[in-house]
Image (tube, rainbow, N blue to C red):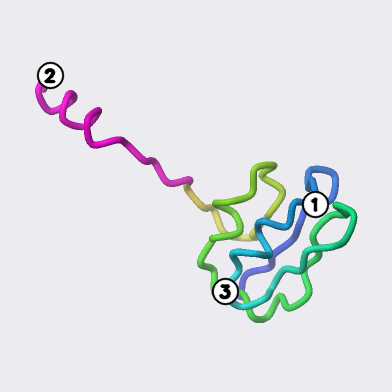
Amino acid sequence: MVQIEVDESLCKGCGMCADVCPTGVLEKQENFEPTKVVNPDDCIQCLSCLEICPAYAVIHKELIPVRRLQIETSTLDMIKKIL
């Protein structure tokens, strides 16, 4: 089981992480207070919260996620022509 935390010094309280969590691990607070971890045992390690957090405040202990790299199709076509 992964431990999930929210770094309160970084969290802006937008609650986007809580909105995308499919299992209700995180809970948005009122008045932009830092998001709280309320059901840590329900985390399925989908990393949706980590991907959407603009402040990089969501931490998964003992898990080293890699941010997804998205390349537009037109850019990819141009790279293929060069190679």
Tell me if residue 44 comes above or below residue 46 in the rendering: below
Residue where numbered disc 1 is placed: 13
Residue where numbered disc 3 is placed: 22
Q: Nearer the viewer, residue 9 or 60?
A: 9
Give me the C-alpha separation between circle 1 and circle 2: 44 Å
Q: Nearer the viewer, mark 1 or mark 2?
A: 1
Kindly indicate the quadrant of the structure image that contains residue 23.
bottom right
Residue type for callout 2: Ile
Mark 1 or mark 2, earlier in chain: 1
Residue type for callout 3: Pro
Q: Nearer the viewer, residue 21 or 3?
A: 21
Asked whether residue 36 is drawn in magenta, I would say no
Give me the C-alpha separation between circle 2 and circle 3: 41 Å
Tell me if residue 38 comes above or below residue 67 in the rendering: below
**Left-right relation of 77 to 54:** left
Q: In the rendering, which numbered label is found on residue 41?
A: none
Q: Secondary structure at mark 3?
A: loop
**Left-right relation of 55 to 48:** right
Residue at the location (66% across, 44% down)? Answer: 56
Mark 3 packing: few (<14 Cα in 10 Å), some, or many (20+)? Answer: some
Residue at the location (78% across, 64% down)? Answer: 28
Q: Nearer the viewer, mark 2 or mark 3?
A: 3
Instruction: Tell me whether the residue at label 3 lies in contact with that at label 1, contact meaning CB atoms closer than 8 angstroms.
Output: no
Q: Specify the segment rendered in magenta.
A: 67-83
Residue at the location (29% across, 35% down)? Answer: 72
Residue where numbered disc 2 is placed: 82
Residue at the location (72% across, 68% down)? Answer: 26
Instruction: Tell me whether the residue at label 1 lies in contact with that at label 2, contact meaning CB atoms closer than 8 angstroms.
Output: no
